[in-house]
Image (tube, grey):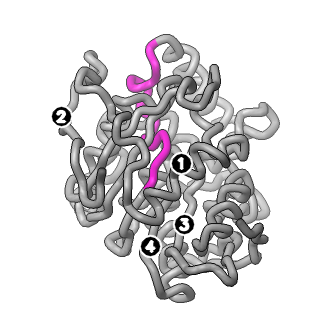
């Protein structure tokens, strides 16, 4: 495998907001397709650079970028910024997808989405261009879906302390607290006040359009959940997948024991310690559309949170699956 370095790039969104990112292009290797890596909320794109470099070494062209308000896409001041999650999808991800299609024309278009990054593509008007998605702990932070044993702690942290500090500071000072990166006020409020139904955070007149954009996505989706992920629980992942009603999702439930570990949580699958296991296995899906973990589906007994029921489908088969 060849190691590649990312080329700094600039992306201009439809509303004129500039984003910073990197393009990772392998040379001398058969091109396998293009990958956009969507970060989690409050996580810098550079956290995913080792994984991007890994994918480029196996023949993919990879785009990493920071959402508006974060890292290389942060404005001079965050105070009073009202960027929202929908802006990250409708504007930022759409611009990243458009950039790839303008510069890299061959091979399938793939998305790796971590946490909110696996949900944002549905907001983009050009999301039907996506062929396959790999999501990890993808959800939109509805508090009743948090793991029961950690729910009170997470509720206080993200739904009480975060909005209070945001109201005082005009943005969320996450870096000073060691709680991820600083966040625009609009993003912090989206996280803090998200209701069971995502579309309820949008004006009533906009809701049909938002739902139609999600319904327009027809990609194959491999949705990864981790047993000790307190945020990306099975019910949280299924709640988010419900919006991709015309996509072809398959759920995979992994555990720390699968990798000889005691803990993985919400973040560490993108750490380079997983290059020889999760990263290598993920190539099967991204390159060939094959589920590397066909025996690791979510169990049929996984239910929605009993105090906030929602409709559920059984995601068993999809195009290209083993």
Residue, disc 2: 311
| Marks 1/4: CA–CA distance | 17 Å
Residue, disc 4: 109
- State which region is magenta: 134-148
Please report the residue visible at 56 percent of the width from the left and 22 percent of the height from the top: 154
Residue, disc 3: 36
Q: Quadrant of residue 99?
A: bottom right
| Closer mark to the observer between disc 4 and disc 2 | 4
What quarter of the picture does the N terminus occupy? bottom right
Of the image marks 1 and 4, the number of the one nearer the N terminus: 4
Q: Are marks 1 and 3 in contact (CB under 8 Å)?
A: no
Asked whether, in this view, residue 123 is left or right of residue 84, the answer is: left
Please report the residue visible at 62 percent of the width from the left and 68 percent of the height from the top: 58
Disc 1 residue crowd, few under 14, some 14–19, many 20+, Cα 10 Å:
many
Residue, disc 1: 114
Asked whether 320 or 92 is in front, the reply is 320
Q: Quadrant of residue 307?
A: top left
Q: Secondary structure at mark 3?
A: strand
Q: Quadrant of residue 64?
A: bottom right
């Amino acid at each position: 495998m060849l190691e590649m370095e990312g080329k700094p790039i600039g992306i201009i969104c439809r509303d004129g907001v500039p984003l910073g990112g990197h393009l990772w292009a392998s040379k001398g290797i058969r091109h396998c397709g293009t990958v956009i890596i969507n970060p989690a909320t409050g996580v810098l794109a550079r956290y995913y650079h080792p994984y991007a470099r890994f994918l480029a070494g196996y023949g993919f062209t990879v785009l990493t970028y920071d959402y508006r308000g974060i890292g290389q896409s942060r404005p001079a001041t965050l105070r009073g910024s009202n960027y929202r999650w929908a802006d990250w999808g409708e504007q930022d991800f759409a611009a990243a997808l458009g950039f790839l299609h303008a510069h890299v024309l061959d091979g399938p278009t793939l998305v790796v989405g971590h946490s909110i990054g696996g949900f944002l593509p549905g907001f983009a008007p050009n999301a039907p261009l996506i062929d396959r998605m790999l999501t990890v702990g993808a959800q939109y932070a509805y508090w009743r879906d948090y793991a029961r044993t950690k729910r009170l702690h997470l509720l206080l942290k993200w739904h009480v302390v975060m909005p209070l500090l945001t109201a005082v500071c005009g943005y969320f000072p996450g870096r000073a607290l060691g709680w991820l990166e600083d966040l625009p006020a609009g993003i912090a409020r989206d996280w803090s006040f998200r209701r069971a139904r995502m579309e309820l955070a949008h004006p009533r007149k906009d809701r049909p359009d938002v739902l139609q954009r999600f319904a327009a996505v027809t990609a194959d989706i491999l949705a990864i959940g981790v047993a000790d992920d307190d945020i990306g629980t099975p019910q949280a992942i299924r709640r988010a997948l419900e919006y991709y009603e015309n996509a072809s999702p398959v759920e995979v439930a992994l555990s720390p024991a699968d990798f000889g570990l005691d803990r993985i949580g919400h973040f560490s699958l993108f750490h380079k310690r997983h290059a020889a296991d999760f990263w290598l296995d993920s190539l099967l899906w991204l390159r060939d559309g094959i589920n590397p973990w066909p025996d690791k589906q979510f169990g049929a007994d996984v239910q929605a949170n009993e105090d906030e029921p929602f409709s559920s489908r059984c995601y068993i088969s999809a195009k290209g699956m083993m």
